[in-house]
Image (cartoon, grey):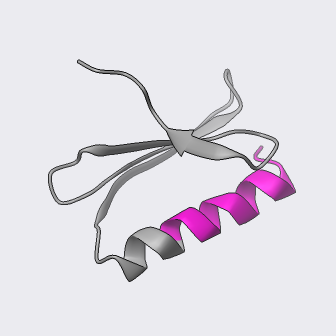
Amino acid sequence: MPTTEQALACVRVCQMLSNGYQPIHVFRYSPSTEMVFILAGITESLEILVFSNGQWGFSDDEA
């Protein structure tokens, strides 16, 4: 279950994406890592991780 801080951070991130007219393709909570993963953007190029402490950042994975 996401933490309160994590849930509020997710709302803020999704609001920023929406304000920029960026579609959200995937929104997933992983119980094993306790992180939320958001895949967004017109070309699905924005990968965002929201940590249990409410901090968030862009994924550094380069495939």
3 to the left or right of 63: right
23 w.r.t. 30: above or below? below
Total label count? 0
**Residue at horizontal 23 percent and vertical 18 percent from the top:** 63
Quadrant showing the N terminus: top right
On screen, residue 38 versus residue 43, left or right, reads right
Identify the residue at image location x=62%, y=69%.
12
Q: Is residue 49 left or right of residue 5?
A: left
Q: 12 or 37: which is nearer to us?
A: 12
Q: Which percent across, then down, holds residue 31?
A: 68, 29
* Magenta span: chief secondary structure: helix
Q: Which residues are magenta?
A: 1-14
Q: Is residue 10 magenta?
A: yes
Q: Position of residue 11 (x, y in %)?
A: 62, 68
| Magenta span contains residue 50 | no
Q: Is residue 63 visible?
A: yes
Instruction: Answer whether residue 49 is visible to the viewer in this image.
Output: no
Viewed as shown, does residue 24 lie left or right of 51?
Answer: left
Q: Residue furthest bottom?
A: 19
Q: Residue furthest left?
A: 43
> Could you tell me which residue is drawn at 15 percent across and 51 percent down?
43
Residue 50 x %, y %:
63, 44
The image shows residue 18 at horizontal and vertical percentages of: 40, 76
Residue at 72 percent of width and 46 percent of height: 55
